[in-house]
C-alpha cells in the first residue's frame, strides 16, 4: 500500500465520473453561471478502468464513484462492472442522491457495487425543495427503497447540516436511523467552490457538537461505536436501544486529515491531492498520449508523494476551485 510523505497509507480513490448533477444543493452548485466539462473531455469507462488498474497495481484497494451525480452517466453500470471485476479490489462504493436508483439499483448491484451513500438533507418535503432545489422527497425515498431491495446494505445516508435549512430536521433523520437500521452521517458544511455557495456555507455553518446535542436531547445519549478503520472520517454512535448508527463528519471543527487515506480523480482525469485542494496531476493527457497502466501508476505515486498535510478549512480557508463537484463520501 502506498504511503505519503507523512506516513499515511493511501488506498482509497474517489473517482468522479461526471460533473453534472440533477440537483442544485444550495451549498454545492449555484443555479446560474455553471460550466460543465464537455463529454469528450470526460474519461471514458475504459480509461477509468485503466486508472483503477493502475491504482490497484500500486496498492490501492477501494474505489468510490461520485460526481456530480454519478448515475447521470449513461455508462455507469459498465463503469461499476469494469472496476468491480478487477483483481485485488476490496470495495466499490458510490455516493448518489438516489433519484435514479429505482431504475439503476439492481443493475448496479449485479455489476458489483457493494455499498451506496445516499445524500438526503431532510425528510421534510418543502425544506428538501429549499435546500436541494430540484428533485422531490418522493423520488429520493423511492431511490432508498430501491437500494434496500437491491441489497445495497446498510443504507448510509449523508446529511449536510445547514443552519435554517435543515438543522431543525436532524432529530427526525436520526430517529429514522433507529427505526430502519440506517447509518445516518451528519456532515459539517464546508465552504467549497468560492462565490455564493461558499458564502452560504460560512454563514450557515453548524458544528457537529451542536447537531449531536440536539439529537441527544431528544433521543437520549449516543454511545460511541469503534471505527472499523482508522481512516473512517465519521465518528460513529449508537443509541442504547434501537438499531442504526449515527455518525458525525466534522471536516471543519475536527479535521481528520492526519488519517486521510484518499485521493481523488476528477471527471476530466486529473488526480487531486486532497478532496479540498486544487493541486492536480493530469492523467487524461497521459492516457490519450498512449500511456497505459504503468504510466498512470507513476503519476499516481507522484500524486501520493505530493499529498498535502491538510486542507486548513478550520482556519477559515475556502477553496476557489471546482472541487465542489468532486466531493464524495
Ligand atoms: N451527487 C452525489 C450526492 O449528492 O451525494 C455525489 C456528489 S456530492 C458533491 C457528494 C457529497 O458531498 C454529498 O453527499 C454531499 O453531502 C456532500 N457535499 C456537497 N457539498 C458540500 C459542502 N459544501 N459541505 C459538505 N458536504 C458537501
Image: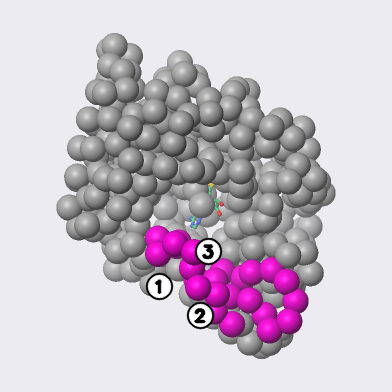
**Does residue 306 show up magenta in the picture?**
no
Mark 2 near ligand 1 (CB under 8 Å)?
no
**Whether the residue under disc 3 has CB within 8 Å of ligand 1:** yes
- Out of 170 and 241, give the one closest to the viewer: 241
Q: Where 152 falls versus 284 (above or below)?
A: below
Q: CA distance from mark 1 to mark 2?
A: 9 Å
Q: State the residue in front, 237 or 270.
A: 237
Residue marked by disc 2? 209
Above or below — where is 107 with respect to 321?
Answer: above
The answer, for residue 100, to whether it is visible in the render is: no
Q: Position of residue 128 (x, y in %)?
A: 71, 56
Label 2 SS: helix
Q: Residues within 10 Å of mark 3 (few under 14, many from 20)?
A: many
Q: Which residues are magenta?
A: 223-247
Q: Secondary structure at mark 3?
A: strand
**Which percent across, then down, holds residue 19?**
50, 34
Residue identifier under label 3: 187
The answer to whether the residue labelled 1 contacts the one labelled 2, judged by CB atoms less than 8 Å apart, is yes
Front-lying residue, 39 or 288: 288
Residue depicted at 54% across the width and 79% down the height: 224
Residue at horizontal 30 percent and vertical 58 percent from the top: 311
Percent across and percent down for residue 25 are 59, 50
| Mark seen at residue 253 | 1
Left or right: residue 201 versus residue 287 is right
Labels 3 & 1 near each other (Cβ < 8 A): no
Q: Earlier in the sequence, mark 3 or mark 2?
A: 3
Work out whether residue 95 can be spotted. yes
Cα–Cα span, label 3 and label 2: 11 Å
Q: What is the distance, in whole Å, between disc 3 and disc 1 at their CAs? A: 11 Å
The mark found on residue 285 in the picture is none
| Local SS, label 1 | loop
Task: Tell me how the rendering is colored.
Answer: one colour
Amino acid at each position: 500500500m502506498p504511503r505519503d510523505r507523512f506516513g499515511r497509507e493511501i488506498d482509497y480513490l474517489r473517482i468522479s465520473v461526471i460533473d453534472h448533477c440533477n440537483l442544485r444543493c444550495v451549498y454545492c452548485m449555484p443555479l446560474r453561471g455553471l460550466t460543465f466539462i464537455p463529454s469528450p473531455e470526460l474519461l471514458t469507462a475504459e480509461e477509468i478502468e485503466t486508472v483503477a488498474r493502475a491504482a490497484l497495481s500500486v496498492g490501492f484497494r477501494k474505489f468510490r464513484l461520485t460526481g456530480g451525480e454519478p448515475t447521470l452517466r449513461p455508462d455507469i453500470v459498465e463503469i461499476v462492472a469494469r472496476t468491480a471485476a478487477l483483481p485485488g479490489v476490496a470495495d466499490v462504493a458510490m455516493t448518489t442522491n438516489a433519484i435514479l436508483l429505482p431504475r439503476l439499483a439492481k443493475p448496479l448491484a449485479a455489476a458489483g457495487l457493494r455499498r451506496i451513500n445516499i445524500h438526503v438533507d431532510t425528510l421534510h418535503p418543502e425544506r428538501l425543495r429549499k435546500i436541494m432545489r430540484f428533485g422531490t422527497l418522493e423520488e429520493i425515498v423511492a431511490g432508498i427503497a430501491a437500494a434496500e431491495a437491491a441489497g445495497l446494505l446498510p443504507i448510509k445516508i449523508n446529511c449536510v447540516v445547514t443552519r435554517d435549512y435543515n438543522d431543525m430536521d436532524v432529530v427526525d433523520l436520526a430517529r429514522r436511523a433507529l427505526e430502519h437500521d440506517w447509518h445516518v452521517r451528519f456532515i459539517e458544511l464546508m465552504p467549497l467552490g468560492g462565490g455564493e455557495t461558499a458564502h452560504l456555507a460560512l454563514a450557515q455553518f453548524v458544528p457537529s457538537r451542536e447537531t449531536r446535542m440536539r439529537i441527544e436531547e431528544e433521543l437520549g445519549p449516543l454511545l460511541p461505536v469503534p471505527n472499523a478503520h482508522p481512516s473512517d472520517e465519521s465518528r460513529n454512535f449508537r443509541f442504547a436501544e434501537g438499531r442504526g448508527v449515527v455518525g458525525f463528519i466534522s471536516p471543519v471543527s475536527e479535521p481528520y486529515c492526519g488519517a486521510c487515506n484518499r485521493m481523488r480523480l476528477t471527471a476530466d482525469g486529473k488526480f487531486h491531492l486532497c478532496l479540498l485542494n486544487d493541486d492536480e496531476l493530469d492523467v487524461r493527457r497521459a492516457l490519450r498520449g498512449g500511456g497505459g497502466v504503468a504510466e498512470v501508476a507513476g503519476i499516481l505515486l507522484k500524486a501520493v508523494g505530493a499529498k498535502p498535510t491538510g486542507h486548513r478549512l478550520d482556519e477559515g480557508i475556502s477553496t476557489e476551485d471546482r472541487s465542489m463537484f468532486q466531493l464524495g463520501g
